[in-house]
């Protein structure tokens, strides 16, 4: 049986159950997404943007799904303590793929700011959600996005009204929890109105020693002069598979800072598609990966300069040990009318062992003539001269390697705007290289 057939059969058999436990707005696009998924099927490695991850193999196992939305027996406030010291946050939880409504944080958000269940808000205000939901994430162009759209029943909705600046970072903790192997389909919709500012920290954790498959689609609308910081950190385990697609639309003079950190995982494929729709906008896409054993991390980015006078910066760094596999494919598309574009893309990688593999493909596609664009990539090992220099000064080889690896990754972390998060990640990265933890330090078993 092909990988996609089990999902086609599942949808046809349980369509009514899926509809009954969701909202009219989410259901309105579900059948179209299903037809798009049937037409496309899972991409093979011949599809350029999925060249480095075998998606058909990823989705081949038979996972359970919680289509009846049964309550999961976990109190996330007791199970997970993912505090970042000295960082003021308002915490929310998504358990598998459902917004956790019990014991919502008592902290008061600024007037008009909404952080809630996507399904519930869609029921209460369908016209507003209908303007945004599944508009950036086009199901006719990506089979995984289509699959997520046809199966997602709930999600997270965040709205920041015009001119509002959210001082506290909104921390969203995604928890994978199950007694059986489980597939979850997370959905996130973020709307940031003109002149508004908000910062997010998304943390992914796997609570149980089960095989998990998580699809995730994030749609983020960033209006004129608005600012969005989106930090996504994965600390799951080797039995966890995550396929995430992030879609961001920027209007005039907006700013986006999107940083992806992979500290622990099994198989991860992150896609980011950002499009400039207004002049004077800027974005900074960054990512760092620490992988060992047989872990696999694939980051794919597309920055679409559709209008003039926008700037983009990209920096992705990998440190791969043992038999880990890493991949980075980045495309900057500069359209014909996008004059005065300023773009730089860098991908730098260290393979600690000869068995580790890194695939890198930075690309520029330019149709305008008055632009400033650059890209480059490197794959190598730790600097022998630097190691020799440090050993000559009494530092043993293991410690010298660790110091070089930490310094290499820290360039990405230092691009973050949140000082407490930078300090916390500096500590986690060092402990990760030392092999001192294999899951979130603040997570405890019930």
Image: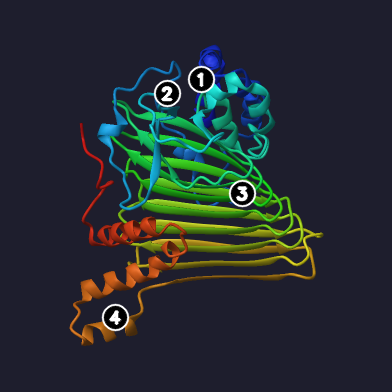
- Rendered-image quadrant of the C terminus: top left
Q: From the top left corner, tell me how far across and down residue 438 is, in percent.
A: 25, 49
Using the image, tell me which numbered label, if any, was put on residue 10: 1
Tell me which numbered mark, 4 or 2, is placed earlier along the sequence.
Answer: 2
Marks 2 and 1 in Cβ contact (< 8 Å) = yes
| Residue placed under numbered mark 3 in the picture | 273
Callout 2: 10 Å neighbours few (<14), some, many (20+)? some
Tell me which numbered mark, 4 or 3, is placed earlier along the sequence.
Answer: 3
Residue drawn at x 40%, y 51% is: 296
Callout 3: 10 Å neighbours few (<14), some, many (20+)? some
Using the image, tell me which numbered label, if any, was put on residue 387: 4
Tell me which numbered mark, 4 or 1, is placed earlier along the sequence.
Answer: 1
Callout 1: 10 Å neighbours few (<14), some, many (20+)? few
What's the CA distance linking mark 4 and mark 2?
50 Å
Image quarter of residue 338: bottom right
Kindly report which numbered mark, 4 or 1, lies closer to the viewer in this rendering.
4
Q: How is the image coloured?
A: rainbow
């Amino acid at each position: 049986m092909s990988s996609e057939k089990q999902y086609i059969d599942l949808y046809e058999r349980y369509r009514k159950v899926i509809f009954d436990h969701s909202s009219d707005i989410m259901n309105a696009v579900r059948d179209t997404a299903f037809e798009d998924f049937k037409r496309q099927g899972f991409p093979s490695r011949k599809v350029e943007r999925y060249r480095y991850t075998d998606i058909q193999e990823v989705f081949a196992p038979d996972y359970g799904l919680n289509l009846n939305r049964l309550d999961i027996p976990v109190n996330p406030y007791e199970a997970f303590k993912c505090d970042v010291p000295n960082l003021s946050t308002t915490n929310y939880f998504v358990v598998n793929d459902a917004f956790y409504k019990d014991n919502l944080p008592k902290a008061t958000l600024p007037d008009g700011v909404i952080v809630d269940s996507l399904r519930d808000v869609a029921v209460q205000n369908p016209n507003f959600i209908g303007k945004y939901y599944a508009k950036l994430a086009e199901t006719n162009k990506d089979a995984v996005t289509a699959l997520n759209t046809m199966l997602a029943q709930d999600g997270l909705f965040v709205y920041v009204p015009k001119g509002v600046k959210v001082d506290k970072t909104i921390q969203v903790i995604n928890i994978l929890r199950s007694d059986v192997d489980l597939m979850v389909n997370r959905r996130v919709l973020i709307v940031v109105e003109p002149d508004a500012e908000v910062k997010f920290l998304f943390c992914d954790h796997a609570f149980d020693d089960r095989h998990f498959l998580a699809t995730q689609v994030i749609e983020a609308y960033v209006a004129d002069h608005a600012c969005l910081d989106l930090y996504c950190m994965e600390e799951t385990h080797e039995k966890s598979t995550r396929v995430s697609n992030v879609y961001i639309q920027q209007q005039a003079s907006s700013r986006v800072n999107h940083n992806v950190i992979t500290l622990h995982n099994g198989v991860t494929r992150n896609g980011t598609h950002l499009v400039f729709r207004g002049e004077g906008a800027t974005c900074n896409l960054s990512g760092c990966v620490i992988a060992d054993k047989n872990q696999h991390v694939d980051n794919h980015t597309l920055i679409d300069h559709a209008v003039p006078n926008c700037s983009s910066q990209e920096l992705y760094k990998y440190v791969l040990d043992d038999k880990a596999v890493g991949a980075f494919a980045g495309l900057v598309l500069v359209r014909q009318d996008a004059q005065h574009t300023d773009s730089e893309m860098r991908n730098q990688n260290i393979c600690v062992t000869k068995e580790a593999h890194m695939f890198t493909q930075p690309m520029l596609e330019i149709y305008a003539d008055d632009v400033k664009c650059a890209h480059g990539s490197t794959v190598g090992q730790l600097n022998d001269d630097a190691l020799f220099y440090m050993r000559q000064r009494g530092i043993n080889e293991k410690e010298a390697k660790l110091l070089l690896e930490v310094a290499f990754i820290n360039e990405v972390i230092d691009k973050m705007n949140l000082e407490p998060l930078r300090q916390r990640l500096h500590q986690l990265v060092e402990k990760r290289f030392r092999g001192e933890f294999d899951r979130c330090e603040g997570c405890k078993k019930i």
